[in-house]
Image: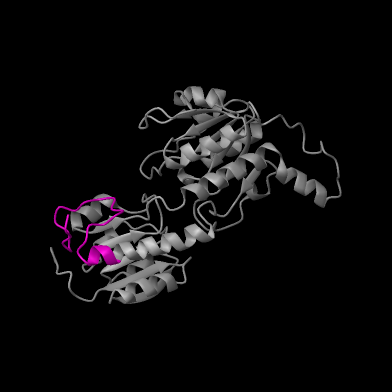
Amino acid sequence: MVGASCNRTYRIVCTDQTSDGEIERRIVEDAGHLFFYRPCRTVEQIGSAGKDADALLVGSLRVGGDLLRQWPCLKVLCSYSTGVDHIDIPAATALGIWVCNAGDYCSEEVADHTMALILAAWRHLVPFREDVRRGIWRYDSAGLIRPLRGAVLGLIGLGRIGRRVARRARAFGMRVIGYDPYVAEVPGVERVTFEELLVRSDIVSLHVPGRPEEPPLLDSTAFSRLKEGAWVVNTSRAGLIDLEAARAALASGRLGGLALDVWEPEPPEVSDPLFEHPRVLVTPHAGWFSTRSNALVRKRTAREAVRVLSGRTPRYAVNRPSEPRVSCRL
């Protein structure tokens, strides 16, 4: 299997249920390969769908080492995402499977969505909407609203999305502070420790990768240090927040509110009481979406699979197998 020839017809399987597969089909078939659309909702379904695949296009379902070892033909796994914490990268690398993401396809959209959640939270849009529905027409029915100018936004994570959010927030006159041990100085952002960020921020926004093997970043200890009444915005990964600790912090008043674009699992298995909470705003993992990003992620994912199977170096690889199942010109 190691170093398989690139001059042949391969089987490329799309398992993402959010795609209709048509963009991917055109790219794959134009390259002379076979395309199969097998949308999956469960790990068991994706296990079956990948059985004979040379390339697999996957959504957010967990792809662990146990699954990867069931797919002897698989040469490249392409994810419709930037983050790949749902894929066992070490296992894929050891098996000679390339893993690729979709690169920086939706940073602008996520930054826009983050800023929209910040504005909705700060201006009390959800309580206002509910009051109007109940026939209450008062400018102060949702409580006091402080000016956004001068409010402190604390960014946890100063990568591509965090920096874009910082630029947007500064345009509104917000003071931006940030914590990221891996990123150098960012213009217009005051660097602080994690603890200082919690104490000073009026709004905390998360922009870091998922941590599947680590405890939540915002746990009961972090919430106890949070500035009283601060909001938390999460457009990153659900596992970064201990929701039980967040519920307790909401009840005590320590946490002013939550604005969440991510949940675990997705979609929720049952309706959660937080969905009805007056200080909680939830959107259905829509931060990445626009007409531009929706088309771009599908094109990039399919093109990356074709590229690897054609023997070319992947553009968006997140690993580098020492003995890949398909050889590429590095």
The answer to whether 75 is drawn above or below residue 161 in the figure is below
Choose between 243 and 147: the one closer to the eye: 147
**Magenta stretch containing residue 119, yes or no?**
no
Where is residue 15 drawn, in percent x and y? 39, 68
The answer to whether 315 is drawn above or below residue 212 in the figure is below
Residue 75 can be seen, yes or no: no
Relative placement, left or right, of 162 versus 282 is: left
Where is residue 92 drawn, in percent x and y? 24, 55
Choose between 326 and 70: the one closer to the eye: 326
Quadrant assignment for the C terminus: bottom left
Tag count: 0
Identified at 33% across, 76% down, the residue is 29
Choose between 172 and 237: the one closer to the eye: 172
Identified at 38% across, 74% down, the residue is 25
* Magenta region: 306-330
Quadrant assignment for the N terminus: bottom left
Q: How is the image coloured?
A: one colour
Q: Quadrant of residue 327?
A: bottom left
Choose between 246 and 297: the one closer to the eye: 297
Where is residue 49 drawn, in percent x and y? 34, 71
**Magenta stretch containing residue 312, yes or no?**
yes
Q: Quadrant of residue 159?
A: top left
Identified at 50% across, 33% down, the residue is 155
Main structural element of the magenta stretch: helix, strand or loop? loop
Residue 171 can be seen, yes or no: yes
Where is residue 5 drawn, in percent x and y? 14, 69
